[in-house]
Amino acid sequence: MSEQSVIHDIGYQRYTGVRLGRGYAARSLFEHGLRVAFGLGRSAKAKIFPWIVIGLVTLLAVIVVAIKAQSGEMVLTYQDYPTAVSTLAMVFLAVVAPELVSRDLRNQTLPLYFSRPVGRADYALAKLGALVAAVWLLLAGPQTLMFLGSAFTAADASGVGAEARGMLGGWVVSTAYALIFSSVSVLIASVASRRAFAAGAIVVVFMVSSGVAGLLIALGGDGPMAQLAPMLSPFLLPEGLRSWLYGTSFDVGAYGPLYGLVTLLLVAGCTSLLVLRYRKVSL
């Protein structure tokens, strides 16, 4: 009995288009992470929480602008704004950071990413970059709204210039908050594959470290211990950095440059550990 083979033409063709490479893959991963942070391109349920937070921080900016228009007084400065909404930013991170990295660990989709030109370090940095950008937009967007509202009520060009300088200072503070909060949060989230555990761990780290720092500040009085204690908490570290850069009622004494150094070391250390985490993760 003879056997016959049949060849079926299924229309397979080799890809002949442009191979966009590693940089494009990393940028796409960053853009996707930024969209995930705000629930864009996802279900209505995924949009609820981030847009509630966006609504709250925007509402605060609108209230500040309305009071400025009525009374001429800025009840909340551009640099004070990130501090005022820092708790909301922390809660936002507790939800978004696990969404960006824990889901991939739990669903074991990392081999799909790493089978493409994107490398493990690219993946880690793209996720961190997306989170930093999301938090910065969360803080800087309402600051821009405050500027636009205040600029219209300014008496002259010098008033507009003063508002612009204030907004730029607020953006600097927002950058510090975004870098510190995001680097710590995404590192914690990268360790846990369950989003609930990762979210809880982020809140615990921020709250417990703040409690310890607050206790040391209370015990230290006006001494060096009270001036150095905020460096123990990622929640208070940006405020100490702001005090050094712009001068606030937050007492850091002569340790301002040390706050800058600790900020750089914290962000660089968390970033390095994040990259190392994904180099060591098993597939």
Image (cartoon, rainbow, N blue to C red):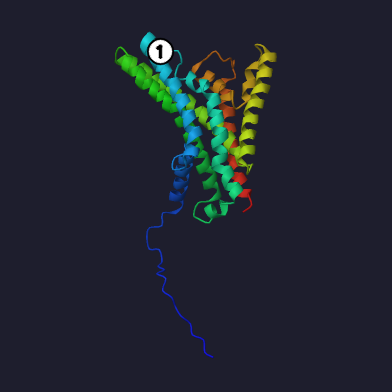
Using the rendered view, name the quadrant where residue 159 is placed: top left
Residue at position x 53%, y 26% in the image: 88
Q: Residue 20's spot in the image, x, y percent?
A: 41, 54
Is there any visible trace of residue 3 in the rendered image?
Answer: yes
- Does dot 1 land on a helix, a strand or a loop? helix
Q: Which residue is mark 1?
A: 67
- Farthest residue in the top direction? 71
Q: Residue 59's spot in the image, x, y percent?
A: 44, 22
Residue nearest the observer in this picture, 234 or 254: 234
Residue at position x 31%, y 17% in the image: 152
Give the mark count: 1
Q: Residue 141's spot in the image, x, y percent?
A: 42, 28
Residue 243 left/right relative to 9: right
Does residue 123 lie above or below 150 as drawn? below
Quadrant location, the C terminus: bottom right
Residue at position x 41%, y 74% in the image: 9
Mark 1: few/some/many CA within 10 Å (<14, 14-19, 20+): some
Residue at position x 29%, y 13% in the image: 156
Residue 18 left/right relative to 241: left
Quadrant location, the N terminus: bottom right
**At label 1, which amino acid type do we have?**
Ile
Is there any visible trace of residue 172 in the rendered image?
Answer: no
Q: Residue 239's spot in the image, x, y percent?
A: 55, 21
- Farthest residue in the left direction? 156
Residue nearest the observer in this picture, 2 or 153: 2
- Farthest residue in the right direction? 219
- Farthest residue in the bottom direction? 1
